[in-house]
Structure formats: structure tokens, C-alpha cells
Image (cartoon, helix red, strand yellow):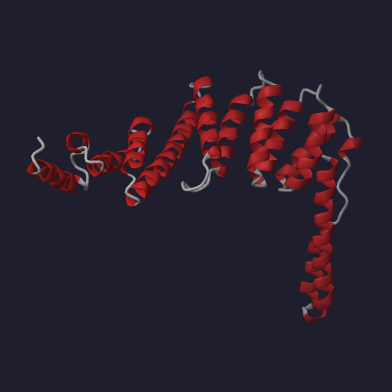
Amino acid sequence: MRLRCALYRRVESVVRRKILETFLNHYRRLPAALAGALLILITAGCAKQKDVTQMEPDAAYRYLVQRYNKGDYLSAVDGLDYFTLTYSGSSLVDSAQFLLAQAHYQLKEYLLAAEAYNELARRFPRSPLVPEAMFQAGLSYYKLSPKYSLDQEQTIKAIDALQGFIDYYPEQAGRVREAQKLIEECRAKLAHKEFASGVIYMKMKHYRAAEIYFQLVLDKYYDTEWAAQAAFKLGQALEGEGKKDEAAEAYRNFLYKYPGHKLKPQAESALGRIAAAGVK
């Protein structure tokens, strides 16, 4: 923690010094009033922050809440790190742990935020802040979820965390609805990834591999927007393998489940083609 804090301060100091040097090199070109105002803004951040290590726990916590509320999340993180480690017996430590997670979240340090939310649930399972921390941990993983074509480890973590929240706190109706919506988005992304893999194998004429991926979408992600296309593509993959009977059955299943889908004409045409080849 000390190394991290020192690094932050060093970077912050260097940035401020560079800004100040640039300002001093050009301030004579500015109107006097504007130059004075800018100088105040630049140097204001250089004022020494209070040392929470010299405060009583209650005063330290109030001060750190003020830093957070003012948007000074870096300062809040450093102080809250110290607070949660040093004042573990304080009645405010669970609140400090939650605020630490929130500060990481505001800094877009979503992995650190998720870890801090999870730490709250582990260390203080009876805290009234646990339900919100569990939801926010899932949301943090969701924020880390990349586009569908990349590794989806964080997407899976988001689903697991959000589903855990739903399972433990079904009475939190508003948050449960939010969690369900996020899970739906994550599942759609996973379905898209599997579907795209199937399409790639179709282009390579590796029909058996494509069949596996399309069937996977239908088995695991049947409730997503990609299920209908996977059902149709499954017919094409089976047809490519020469499995005409199974392909015809796949097309019929597609037409039965998705009668209004835009691919309906193509499915009907495929059935006609198979029938003309002597397959019922």
C-alpha cells in the first residue's frame, strides 16, 4: 500500500510541476486576472492533505468521507486503505471498506473495486452494506467485460456475482431487476461469441465443428437473440455434413419456434431443396 501511495504522490507531483512550469513560461501572455486565477487553481492541489494516521477513527472517517464527496478519490483510497487495515475494530470499518470500493469504482479501477466489495462481504457478512456490495461487485465485473470476440472471463464473473446477489437477496426487487438485465446482456455476449465461432467454422467448411457451436448456443443460450440464427445455421451445418434428414428436422424446428423470423424464406427454401433430393 505504501509503495502504491508513494507512486501516486510522485506521479501527481510530477504532473503538477510540469503544469506549473508550462504556466510560468507563458503566463505573461495572459491577462493579469486570468493568470492569477489559473495560478490559484494549479497550486491549490499542492496544499498538504491532512494525515489520517494522526486522527482518531471517527474524525479520520469523517475526513475521508469529505475527500470522497469532493471527488478526491485518490486521496480517499489511500486514507481508506490505511483505515480498513488499522481500525479493524471500529464500528465504521465496514462503511470505510464500502467507501474504499466506491472510490476505486469512481476511478474506473473496476477490478480493485470488485475485490474491495468482495472483501466487505467476506470480512463483514452481517453488515447491512453487504447486499449493495455484492451487486456492485457484479457491476464492476460487468464494466470489465470486453467485446464478444475477446476472452470472456470477466463476463462470466459478472454473471456469477450478479446471480449470487439475486439468489441471496431476492427481496431487493429493484436491484434484482437491474441484475437480471445485466445478466441478460452478458449471456447475449457469450452467445454471440459461440455463434461467431460457428460461423467461422462454416466459412472454413468445418461443418462438424460449426454444428457443435450452434448446438451449444441452443442448449445454453436458448433465451438470447442469437438462438434463432443458431437454429437456422444448425440446419446449414448438418446439410453441409450431408446429414439431410437431420438438416430437414433442424429447419422444421427453426420454423416451428421462430415462425416470424426473417430467415423463414431461406429455411423453407432449404426444406424444398432437401425434399427435391428425395428426403422427407
Residue 280 left/right relative to 78: left
Residue at the spot x=89%, y=34% of the render?
Answer: 55
Residue 103 left/right relative to 206: right
Quadrant assignment for the N terminus: top right
Residue placed most toward the observer, 199 or 71: 199
Residue at the spot x=44%, y=42% of the render?
Answer: 189
Looking at the picture, does residue 86 appear above or below residue 30?
A: above
Q: Which residue lies furthest to the front in this view?
A: 242
Residue 242 in which image quadrant = top left
Report x, y in % for residue 41: 78, 62
Residue placed most toward the observer, 266 or 128: 266
Q: Residue furthest top?
A: 126
Residue placed most toward the observer, 243 or 115: 243
Residue at the spot x=62%, y=30% of the render?
Answer: 133
Looking at the picture, does residue 28 appear above or below residue 246?
A: below
Residue 219 in which image quadrant = top left
Report x, y in % for residue 98: 69, 32
Quadrant assignment for the C terminus: top left
Residue placed most toward the observer, 168 or 60: 168
Report x, y in % for residue 29: 78, 81
Residue at the spot x=79%, y=67% of the render?
Answer: 19
Report x, y in % for residue 59: 84, 33
Count of labels in the image = 0
Q: Which residue lies furthest to the right in this view?
A: 54
Residue 5 left/right relative to 201: right
